[in-house]
Image: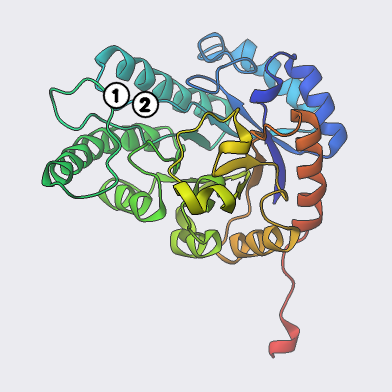
């Protein structure tokens, strides 16, 4: 496995400077935002799409720092009930798939999106319970919308030989492993998970069991931790709408790797990923408000460097 980084926190720095810094830390892969919430500071999608000279320049820059791209990131909501917003997100995603193909990158990371609760609604609706019955009806409607959209998008991705890795994220239709598998079963194996454990921890999901459940449906992995603060969660639960900047009041916070779960847990997670055949990047996504991007990232790299395996498994001579 390679230790990688989603470069969004370094958007105010050039790609050259970012790669020089990351390379010095021993980071071997980068995940580059090219639209949606991640932005496109390091990979202006429209400028590089269909431009062989610009793409060659990017490859030269990556080669200079001995770095490869693990995925292109364009997280947005292509199922939004506002048609203009949905169309914009859809364009970003389809163009990201085309650009990934042109760059020789095999994965695009994104969200599943979230529709409204019905055809006449104006805002997305995250349904978390089947009662009263109109919520179950809304959920059925959302899955019909999502299945139609993602079937078509999966065909587009397959045409370009690119996997689409969906991040299971609350406030999106797919937010846990069973939903991820449901969408994959209803569409195509081109769709899989961008496995980000940080969104699963606070839901009470055992992430190593989730890895075993998803298996080869894992197309990409984010390395991001979460700490649940039980003094708050015991009183108000974990469905917490408190502002992320009001850290003492929240039930949970995103944390740098190792600050929500210890090193032994991350070694177990890395080992379980290897058990199910995943050998791609662990792309560090820094969203820890208790430290700076650089310090949080450096501590995450240090821990993951001790957790990942650099060699392939040898023969199990003791089993003969």
Which residue sits at x=44%, y=40%?
Answer: 169
Left or right: 187, with 32 as reference point: left
One can see residue 310 in this view: no
Q: Nearer the viewer, residue 209 or 162?
A: 209
Which residue sits at x=48%, y=57%?
Answer: 204
Which residue sits at x=67%, y=31%?
Answer: 289
- Vertical side of 266 occupied by 249: above or below: above
- Provide residue 101's location: percent of width, then percent of height: 50, 29
Left or right: 166, with 262 as reference point: left
Instruction: Report the residue that reaches farthest toward the right.
Output: 24
**CB contact under 8 Å: marks 2 and 1:** yes
- Provide residue 88's location: percent of width, then percent of height: 36, 15
Q: Quadrant of residue 287?
A: top right
Which residue is tagged 1? 80
One can see residue 252 in this view: yes
Could you tell me which secondary element the residue under label 2 belongs to?
loop
Which residue sits at x=72%, y=77%?
Answer: 315
- Provide residue 81's location: percent of width, then percent of height: 24, 22
The Cα atoms of the two marked residues, 2 and 1, are separated by 6 Å
Which residue is tagged 2? 77
Q: Look at the image and tell me in which quarter the C terminus lies.
A: bottom right
Could you tell me which secondary element the residue under label 1 belongs to?
loop
| Numbered circles on residues, count | 2
Instruction: Report the residue that reaches farthest toward the bottom.
Output: 320
- Provide residue 150's location: percent of width, then percent of height: 30, 36
Instruction: Report the residue that reaches farthest toward the top.
Output: 47
């Amino acid at each position: 496995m390679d230790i990688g980084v989603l470069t969004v926190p370094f958007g105010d720095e050039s790609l050259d400077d970012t790669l020089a810094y990351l390379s010095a830390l021993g980071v071997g892969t980068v995940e580059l935002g090219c639209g949606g919430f991640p932005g496109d500071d390091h990979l202006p999608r429209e400028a590089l799409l269909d431009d062989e000279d610009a793409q060659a320049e990017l490859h030269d820059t990556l080669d200079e720092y001995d770095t490869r791209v693990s995925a292109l990131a364009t997280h947005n909501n292509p199922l939004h009930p506002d048609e203009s917003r949905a169309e914009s997100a859809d364009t970003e995603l389809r163009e990201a798939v085309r650009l990934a193909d042109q760059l020789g990158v095999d994965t695009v990371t994104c969200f599943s999106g979230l529709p409204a609760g019905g055809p006449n609604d104006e805002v997305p609706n995250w349904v978390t319970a089947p009662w009263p019955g109109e919520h179950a009806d809304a959920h059925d409607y959302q899955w019909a919308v999502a299945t139609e959209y993602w079937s078509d998008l999966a065909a587009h991705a397959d045409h370009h030989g690119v996997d689409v890795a969906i991040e299971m994220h609350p406030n999106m239709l797919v937010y846990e492993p069973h939903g991820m598998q449901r969408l994959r079963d209803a569409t195509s194996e081109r769709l899989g998970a961008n496995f980000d454990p940080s969104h699963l921890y606070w839901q009470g999901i055992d992430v190593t069991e989730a890895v075993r459940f998803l298996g080869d449906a894992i197309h990409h992995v984010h390395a991001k931790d979460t700490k649940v603060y039980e003094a708050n969660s015991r009183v108000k639960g974990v469905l917490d709408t408190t502002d992320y900047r009001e850290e003492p009041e929240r039930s949970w916070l995103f944390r740098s790797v190792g600050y929500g779960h210890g090193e032994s847990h991350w070694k177990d997670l890395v080992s379980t990923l290897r058990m199910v055949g995943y050998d791609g990047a662990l792309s560090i996504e820094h969203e820890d408000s208790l430290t700076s991007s650089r310090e949080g990232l450096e501590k995450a790299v240090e821990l993951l460097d001790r957790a990942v395996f650099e060699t392939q498994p040898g023969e199990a001579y003791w089993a003969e």
